[in-house]
Amino acid sequence: MSYARALKAAVVTAIATAVGHLAMSAGFTWARGQEPDHPDDWSGLPEFGATVLATWILMPLVLWVGMRVLGERRTWFQILLGTPLWVGVSSVYIDDVDHPGGLMPVPVLVLFVLAGALLGAYDPGSVRNDEAGTART
């Protein structure tokens, strides 16, 4: 395992988590501000749904772009497993964010960043290179 790659993955996952969390917070504020036309109207529901969907789309994009900017390739493992993990975490703690000044629990966010760092540290190309080097000797 490359510690430099794990550090890069931790930084990128922390940034992606912050972006996702800020997008949720801003989007939910926007959704709460929608005035209902009727008392029984589900005002803000399209905005709420768009916010959730946007954070779910942002996570893989920020992970991929961040790792590419830092010069890392073969990050599909981090993206394919980190994104559903974010979907789960953001779904479970959606009510914590959906009020003014709301935050997900910090330990959960720290665990998510650690999971993203471990997922991003895995480089399938290095495994193939290690096996090829061992086969030659």
Image: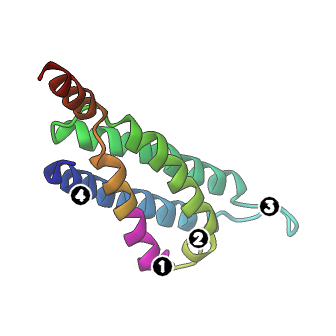
The residue to which callout 3 is attached is 42
**Dot in front, 4 or 3:** 4
Residue 61 appears at what percent x and percent y? 39, 40
For numbered disc 2, what is the local secondary structure?
Answer: loop
The answer to which of marks 4 and 2 sits earlier in the sequence is 4
Q: Specify whether 21 is left or right of 100.
A: left
How far, Cα to Cα, is label 4 from label 3?
38 Å
The residue to which callout 2 is attached is 93
Q: Amino acid at mark 3?
A: Trp
The answer to which of marks 2 and 1 sits earlier in the sequence is 2
Q: Is residue 75 above or below residue 49?
A: above
Name the residue at 30% across, 57% down: 15
Q: Please say whether residue 15 is one of the residues in the magenta stretch.
A: no
Q: Are marks 3 and 2 in contact (CB under 8 Å)?
A: no
How far, Cα to Cα, is label 2 from label 1?
8 Å
Residue 28 appears at what percent x and percent y? 57, 64
In terms of depth relative to the viewer, which is nearer, 5 or 37?
5
Q: Amino acid at mark 1?
A: Pro
Q: Is residue 85 above or below residue 62?
A: below
